Image: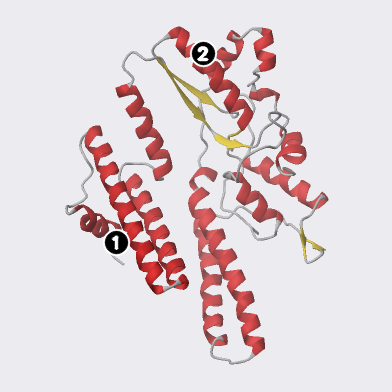
Amino acid sequence: HPPYEDLAKELSGKEYPVPKTFEAEVEGMIEIGQQIREKIAQTDDSSQRFGVNTEKSAKKWLENQLVEAGRNHALMRGWHDIYTYTKALGEEMVSRMRGDLPVAIIRPSIIESSLEEPSPGWLAGLRMADPIIIGFGKGRLPDFPATPNITLDIIPVDIVVNATLAAAARSYENGGIEVYHITSGYTNPLSFQRLHDLTMEYFREFPMVDKGNPISVSAWKFPSKEKFSREFEGKLRYLSMLSWILKKIPTKWASKKNRRIAVLQNAIERLLYYADIYGPYANLNFDFEARKVNELHQFLSPEEQYAYHFDPSRIDWKHYLQQIHIPG
């Protein structure tokens, strides 16, 4: 398969330089987005002709290509991934196109399950920290390349919603454009080490179960990204070689063993994926200025503060993680 630059050239008919203007960048992204949709449609048509296995392989290949394409696109512009880059583009579009409309730009940190509303622990789907927590509890994440003393800035979803409602009303009164960082690290920091310790404490008291047996969890050593990748990529190569040998043995035992190896390979691949995707967020100590949100909270009347509370300093992290978030 061609590298991203060649694929982009093939799709657009031109080289892929970084556009010099914001307008050209947005136009180019819309154009390549349409071309990607057409490429997906072609893949679906081909898959229907060649069967289910081909469909799965084609979609998996396309998914990997799109992830890599998005990452390269963002890296060429100084961003870690396409998610953060497109959020920045969206803010720029709002600031340029709003005219005289009052605007509040909301920048939450890592959104996790609710503290209270609509019910404690509510959240649709899994967020950033959740695959790591679940992988740890299942014993599939024996270690992780993180800096333990950094602040992992997470915020319950109901705090984000309440602050957004208050910011919208305040921005309408003030006019102009205002930016609000809805975060916890400014007033109530949670370190990665404390998240790890509280999670381990929970799963040792309430272990997950595998075939009726409790799963034991061990403390992480927080290796470097290089050491972590070297160790698990080596295990993956060993398993691939072992699988190749077992496929040459036409016995039920070999087939059964190969299925177990496939499960292990999948687990290690997911492990490396999480380390690759979340590694930068687990090794950089972000410090978000949240003074404006604190001032917004003080601006509300006592009745409004009670009804629309969004003060993160009141979060008890032990209670939140062990009694609300992980059980939820």
The relative height of residue 143 versus residue 241 in the rendered view (above or below) is above
The relative height of residue 250 versus residue 324 in the rendered view (above or below) is below
- Which numbered circle lies on residue 3? 1
Q: Considering the image in quadrants, where does the N terminus appear?
A: bottom left
Q: Position of residue 154 (x, y in %)?
A: 60, 35
Does residue 228 appear in the picture of this structure?
no
Q: Position of residue 53 (x, y in %)?
A: 47, 72
Q: Considering the image in quadrants, where does the C terminus appear?
A: top right
Locate residue 173 relative to residue 320 in the image: left or right: left
The relative height of residue 264 versus residue 299 in the rendered view (above or below) is below
C-alpha distance separating marks 1 and 2: 48 Å
**Disc 2 marks which residue?**
169
Give the residue at x 57% y 66%. 266
Q: How would you rate the neighbour count of disc 2 (Cα within 10 Å): few for under 14, some for 14-19, many for 20 or more? A: few
Give the residue at x 74% y 37%. 324
Q: Nearer the viewer, mark 1 or mark 2?
A: 2
Image quadrant in which you'd find residue 103: top left
Residue type for callout 1: Pro
Pick out the residue farthest to the bottom.
250
Q: How would you rate the neighbour count of disc 1 (Cα within 10 Å): few for under 14, some for 14-19, many for 20 or more? A: few
Secondary structure, mark 2, is helix
Give the residue at x 68% y 30%. 118
Please tell me which of labels 1 and 2 falls first in the chain. Answer: 1
Residue type for callout 2: Ala
Locate residue 4 relative to residue 176 in the image: left or right: left
